[in-house]
Image (spheres, grey):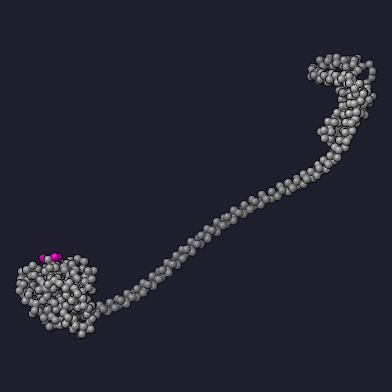
Amino acid sequence: MSIISYAQNFEDVMLWRALKHVEIGFYIDVGANDPDQDSVTKAFYDRGWRGINIEPVSQWFEKLVRERLRDINLQIAAGAKAGELLIYELPDTGLSTFDRGIAERHEAERGYQKIERIVPVKTLTEICINLHTSPIHFLKIDVEGAEKQVLEGVDFSILRPWIVLVESTLPNSPIEDYETWEPILLTANYEYVYFDGLNRFYVAKEHLELRDSFMIPPNVFDGFALSGDATSPFCNQVLAEVKQNASEASSANTRVEHLAEELEKTTQALEKSEMTLTEQQAHTQWLQNEWDAAKAHAEHLTTQLDEKSAALAGIEAILAEQQAHAQWLQNEWDAAKAKIDELNHSSDHWWTVADGLNQELQGVYGSKSWRITWPMRMVMKFIKRLFSLFLQLIRWVLLLPKRTVKRLLRVAMRIVLARPGLKAKGLRFLASRSELKARLRSLAANNGMLAFPPVSATSAGAHVPVLTEHQRLNADLPQLTPHARRIYDDLKAAIANQQKGDN
């Protein structure tokens, strides 16, 4: 099964050759540094392994925390005993160290700027007792000169990594430097099995079956591939190509980002234009609706105007008619007012006449003849009442059957003709009723009641001129006030009575 190698010197290839039969293993990486570039544990983590990463430098620890979620990441240093140490950090490198001389050499030779910082220190035994003791499939140590202190803090009776690999050359040098710390491993029953030019590999004697995996260096039959981002010279060409590709990709990305920005601007402009168009369309539709509503309202108002105009024409016609009627009424009023003025003038005249007549009447009432004729007036009043009864009798008789009426009329006519007073009254009553008078005269003549020829209308009544004068006066009566009319009626009655008395 092939793997992708991330390690600087194919350490992960050699370890995978020995441990590929372990399905999910456990590792301890002291001086873990970057979780990807030059990492010995990256290939195993990608295969599902997990472990403990010890890294005191903040830059690499924070990256481990972000990318190694299954691992236990500790920002401490591993040493021979617990406490604190001064570390010299060299940013952006894997060369940070506890050795002041090494830090100053890097600073002098390569221009690095060291940063001094105090970090906590624990022994690897203490760390593992609290977190994990077994199994440990491999322990990798890369601490830039502090390898002996790390190994002195391991109780190999408790912790038994199957494989231990330790960087065994001076920093950035092919010169081997392992004599001070190798005896610790050999004494702990570990056997040296392989040197790759940078690291020495040791196998626990209880797992010497793994020793055969370290007899030959990495080769084509290991079936591995380079990740391309390691700092090893093996990757320089790949890195150059990768950098070139990255540069081209960066340029392309920049171009893409620029195009994306342009596209975004264009899209925003398009969306804005579409929004503006939508708003304009909505506004246009609103204006159309308003226009339609205004047009409909105008048509409605036009219809109402026509109706109102027709109604106004009718009202004007009625008004003209009313004005004409009002003018007619005004004319009638003026005529009536003139007539009233005339009547008032006539009323004054008749008041004067009435007053004179009233004075004459009072003179009559106070005269001796009026007192002497009182019995006669009483008799005349009785006769008038009797004559009134006679007239009522005649009206009643007229309602009877014709034969009975004729009989009663003959009796009544004999009574009236036998009495001169009644006869005179009857003649006066019939004076204005010529047709009735002629019929009664014919009836009287046929029954032998008349011994003289018919008298003409002119000779029958001596008072015709007087009655004609009364009729003339009656024609003017509508011009009198009610009070004047009553006085006139009283005067006429008095004059009539006086004339009867004279007769």
Q: In the displayed structure, does residue 24 sit left or right of residue 314?
A: left
Res 104 → quadrant: bottom left
Magenta part of the protein: which range? Answer: 130-135
Residue 424 coordinates in the image, percent (x, y): 90, 20
Q: Residue at x 92, y 16 (%)?
A: 450
Up the image or down, 90 lies above or below 311; here it is below
486 or 283: nearer the eye? 486
Q: Examine the structure image and report whether residue 160 is included in the region drawn in magenta.
A: no
Whether 366 is drawn above or below 316: the answer is above
- Main structural element of the magenta stretch: helix, strand or loop? loop
Q: Please say whether residue 345 is visible from this viewpoint.
A: yes
Task: Quarter of the image for the C terminus: give it.
Answer: top right
Residue 393 picture quarter? top right
**Residue 496, percent from left and from top:** 89, 26
Out of 279 and 374, give the one closest to the viewer. 374
Residue that appears at 20% across and 85% down? 109
Residue 394 shows in the view: no
Task: State the residue in front, 279 or 470.
Answer: 470
Q: Is residue 144 left or right of residue 444?
A: left
Q: Position of residue 274 (x, y in %)?
A: 44, 66
- Asked if residue 365 lies left or right of residue 217, the reply is right
Quarter occupied by residue 381: top right
**Farthest residue toward the bottom?**
109
The residue at the point 17 percent across, 78 percent down is 97
Judge from the rendering whether residue 9 lies leftward or rightward of residue 186; answer left or right.
right
**For residue 134: magenta?**
yes
Q: Residue at x 60, y 54 (%)?
A: 301
In depth, the one of 315 and 260 nearer the eye is 315
